[in-house]
Amino acid sequence: MVQAIVNLGEYEDRILTIVKGKYGLKNKSDAVNYVIDRFDQELLEPNLRPEFVRKVRSLEKQGKFKAYKSIGALRASIK
């Protein structure tokens, strides 16, 4: 476990207190971990929307994608 000293402003401290109370967490350390976990789930690796997956699969069936054997082949087709 890593320990860190964090300087929070008054507003940030209030937010952590609200998160701690809303989700029944034991302390502000748990609240920070909860916020980080939510950030990870929502922003760093979001799931693809089903509409997007359907659209990509539809494009694959239509043959709109082309496979390249190397980066050089891709670059040659772009120029």
Image: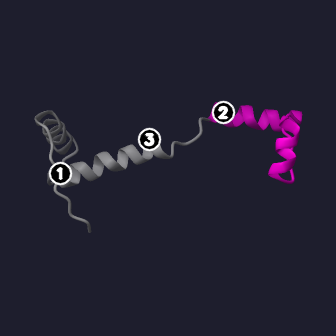
Q: Of the numbered discs in the image, which one, if any, rests on residue 52?
A: 2
User: Per the image, is 18 magenta?
Assistant: no
Residue 59 in the image, given as x and y percentages of width and height: 81, 33
Give the spatial CA distance, label 2 vs label 1.
40 Å
Q: Amino acid at mark 1?
A: Val
Q: Assign a secondary structure to mark 1.
A: loop
> Foreground: 20 or 11?
11
Check disc 3 and report the residue beneath it.
Answer: 42
Location of residue 19 with respect to 25 vertically, above or below: above
Decide: few, some or many residues near mark 1? Use Cα within 10 Å; few <14, some 14-19, many ≥20.
few
Q: Amino acid at mark 3?
A: Glu
Check disc 1 and report the residue beneath it.
Answer: 6
Instruction: Name the image quarter holding residue 60.
Output: top right
Q: Assign a secondary structure to mark 3.
A: helix
Q: Between label 2 and label 1, give the one nearer the viewer.
A: 1
Q: Assign a secondary structure to mark 2.
A: helix
Secondary structure that dominates the magenta span: helix
The answer to whether residue 15 is left or right of residue 52 is left
Q: Between label 1 and label 3, give the one nearer the viewer.
A: 1
The answer to whether residue 73 is left or right of residue 44 is right
Q: Residue placed farthest to the left in the image? A: 10
Q: Which residues are magenta?
A: 50-79
Q: Amino acid at mark 2?
A: Phe
The answer to whether residue 6 shows anywhere in this view is: yes
User: Per the image, is 54 magenta?
Assistant: yes
Instruction: Name the image quarter holding residue 47.
Output: top right
